[in-house]
Image (cartoon, helix red, strand yellow):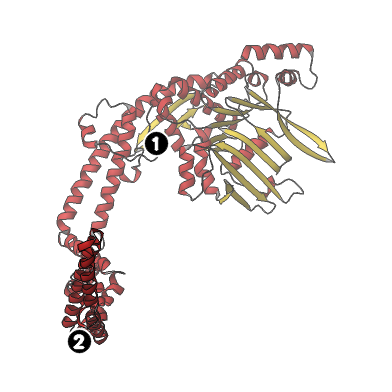
């Protein structure tokens, strides 16, 4: 939902702030007050084209910003573009300077217009007089039809596909639309991954042969080294230190042995004398029995240590040949580590990897045959599921076009309307949402051929058609739709009432109110019949201050709404009759 919109030095606006609420938000005001300018400002924040014309005369730059409630989809887009999310809101800001250049910020972090365009369908659909953004392109038309049918082709965030497609295909007839949406995502993922694997195995033959030579050499070099273990170099380093310091080690070990055991005043001799005296004391005082026992244990420990160091000294082999052998071995191992990894464990792992790659290449023909079989199975699965989806969409299209045509004709238009579902079965058209090209066609005059909507409808007609479509989807669509498929947060219509009046205007107001019961709607209107349905009514007005025209926006209270609707009825002079009429309209709209 759009919470707030700000504009500074934008066109005739010096500074304006509007805080919107849920439901139907309507903007009214005198012609030329700047109502559509606010819609254009929001369109700019949805990624619209910026020019220097939007900068207020005399200002260095125009700044527009808004605050939306965050959605899981919007947060995923921010994360994919390296932008941090901030709580439950998303702040968009765009600056345009007098040269036409500008900057974009999301949550006060630098971004690009491309990211704004990615976010737009997740946050708002803007139907302006100058352009229709994110409303009637092929993807949005397909999305409306899917919503009507209850088909959810939008994957759940953070949820991996875990559907057994083969089991689904055995009983694919009669699957509900939600299952059809899940199936097409799964089928597309499996097909794409199988094609990628086949492409990898079928890589350029010359490159493959070059890599075989390299990997064979690397495997041979590692195997020839016959590494005994990941710690071989550490053990050899220890042995090298011993050999390089053999004389010092022998002297130290023998000296320790003599001090502990051999000398006349050795530790063992001294402990033996002390033990004898304590044993004598223990004969008369039993409290000395334990100390005497401890000395006996100490003598045993000293004897063991003495024996260990003597044995170590006797086994020292000051062999220059062995030292040279170790140094050569360590040099060879270091060479391998420089080429294949920081540690011997890395070298061993690398050898395993190249061995596996060579084995794969040796079995390449068999692997390619298996990959082709998998691709064929996945192609068949995708085809089956896509055909199911086409059938489901086609049935839903026939229902939607009847409802939409009736709704459109209620809005002072006399049209023929059709929703065309055309399967494009070439693999270049396969996507995660199927192969169907969905397009809305319209004929605004009897006897005229049906043509794409954007070729026929004017700006006001386009907005009315979109309103009728949205109402048809929300009121006539599958019940599961509202439970499972997220709604676009905000719909924006600019001057949807062009060329209508009377009952048609009241019908537009009723449809806007019905649509606003499901999602936030923001609409610019000149008609009192529509303004009476507002849940939040904003007045856009111009004033002159210090020789400059300024546009401001403010939300009106109930009594102010009566006066504004009366003005819309009678013009500049508000009469008692128009006030009473306005009161009746407000009462009837509730």
Q: Where is residue 455 in the image (x, y as percent from the top left)?
A: 52, 35
Badge 2 crowding class, 10 Å Cα cut-off, few under 14, some 14 to 19, many 20 or more, is some
Nearest the viewer among 100 and 113 is 113
Nearest the viewer among 137 and 166 is 166
The relative height of residue 448 versus residue 372 in the rendered view (above or below) is above
Which image quadrant: the N terminus?
Answer: top right
Q: Where is residue 90 in the image (x, y as percent from the top left)?
A: 55, 40
The relative height of residue 223 versus residue 423 in the rendered view (above or below) is below
Any mark on residue 154, and which? 1
How many angstroms separate mark 2 from mark 1 (CA)? Answer: 75 Å
Q: Is residue 10 visible?
A: no
Any mark on residue 325, and which? none
The residue under the point 42% across, 28% down is: 147
Q: What residue is shown with label 2?
A: 318
Q: Is residue 98 visible?
A: yes
Is residue 225 found left or right of 35 in the rendered image?
A: left
Secondary element at image label 2: loop
The residue under the point 59% across, 24% down is: 24
Is residue 73 found left or right of 188 in the rendered image?
A: right
């Amino acid at each position: 939902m759009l919470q707030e919109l700000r504009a500074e030095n934008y066109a005739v606006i010096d500074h304006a702030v509007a805080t919107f609420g849920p439901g139907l938000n309507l903007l009214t005001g005198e012609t030329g007050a700047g109502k559509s300018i606010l819609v254009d400002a929001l369109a700019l924040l949805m990624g619209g084209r910026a020019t220097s014309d939007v900068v207020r005369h005399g200002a260095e730059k125009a700044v527009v910003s808004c605050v939306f409630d965050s959605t899981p989809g919007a947060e995923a887009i921010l994360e994919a573009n390296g932008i941090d999310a901030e709580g439950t809101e998303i702040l968009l800001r765009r600056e345009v300077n007098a040269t036409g250049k500008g900057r974009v910020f999301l949550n006060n972090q630098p971004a690009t217009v491309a990211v704004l365009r990615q976010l737009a369908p997740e946050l708002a659909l803007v139907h302006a007089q100058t352009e229709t953004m994110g409303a009637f392109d092929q993807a949005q038309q397909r999305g409306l039809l899917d919503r009507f049918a209850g088909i959810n082709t939008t994957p759940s965030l953070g949820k991996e596909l875990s559907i057994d497609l083969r089991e689904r295909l055995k009983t694919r007839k009669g699957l509900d639309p939600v299952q059809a949406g899940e199936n097409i995502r799964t089928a597309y993922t499996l097909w794409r991954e199988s094609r990628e694997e086949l492409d990898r195995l079928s890589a350029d033959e010359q490159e493959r042969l070059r890599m075989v030579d390299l990997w064979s050499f690397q495997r041979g070099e590692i195997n020839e080294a016959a590494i005994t273990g990941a710690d071989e170099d550490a053990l050899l380093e220890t042995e090298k230190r011993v050999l390089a310091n053999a004389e010092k080690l022998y002297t130290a070990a023998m000296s320790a042995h003599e001090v502990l055991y051999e000398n006349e005043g050795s530790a063992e001799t001294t402990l033996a004398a002390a033990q004898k005296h304590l044993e004598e004391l223990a004969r008369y005082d039993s409290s000395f029995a334990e100390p005497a026992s401890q000395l006996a244990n100490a003598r045993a420990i000293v004897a063991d240590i003495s024996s260990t160091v003597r044995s170590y000294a006797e086994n020292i082999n000051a062999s220059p040949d062995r030292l040279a052998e170790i140094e050569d071995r360590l040099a060879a191992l270091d060479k391998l580590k420089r080429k294949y990894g920081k540690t011997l464990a890395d070298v061993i792992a690398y050898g395993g990897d190249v061995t596996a790659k060579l084995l794969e290449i040796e079995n390449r023909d068999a692997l390619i045959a298996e990959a082709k079989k998998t691709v064929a199975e996945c192609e068949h699965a995708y085809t089956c599921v896509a055909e199911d989806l086409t059938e489901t969409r086609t049935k839903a299209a026939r229902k939607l076009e009847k409802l939409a045509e009736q709704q459109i004709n209620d809005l002072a238009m006399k049209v023929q309307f059709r929703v065309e579902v055309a399967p494009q079965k070439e693999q270049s058209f396969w996507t995660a949402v199927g192969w169907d090209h969905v397009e809305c066609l319209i004929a605004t005059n009897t006897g005229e051929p049906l043509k794409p909507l954007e070729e026929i409808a004017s700006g006001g007609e386009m907005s009315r058609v979109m309103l009728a479509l949205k109402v048809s989807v929300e009121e006539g669509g599958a019940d599961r739709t509202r439970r499972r498929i997220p709604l676009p947060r905000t719909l924006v219509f600019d001057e949807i009432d062009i060329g209508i009046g009377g009952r048609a205007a009241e019908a537009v107001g009723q449809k806007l109110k019905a649509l606003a019961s499901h999602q936030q709607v923001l609409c610019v209107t000149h008609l009192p019949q529509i303004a009476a349905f507002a849940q939040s009514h904003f007045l856009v007005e111009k004033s002159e201050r210090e020789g400059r025209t300024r546009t401001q926006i403010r939300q009106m209270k109930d009594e102010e709404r009566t006066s504004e609707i009366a003005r819309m009825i009678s013009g500049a002079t508000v009469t008692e009759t128009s006030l009473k009429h306005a009161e009746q309209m407000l009462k009837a709209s509730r």
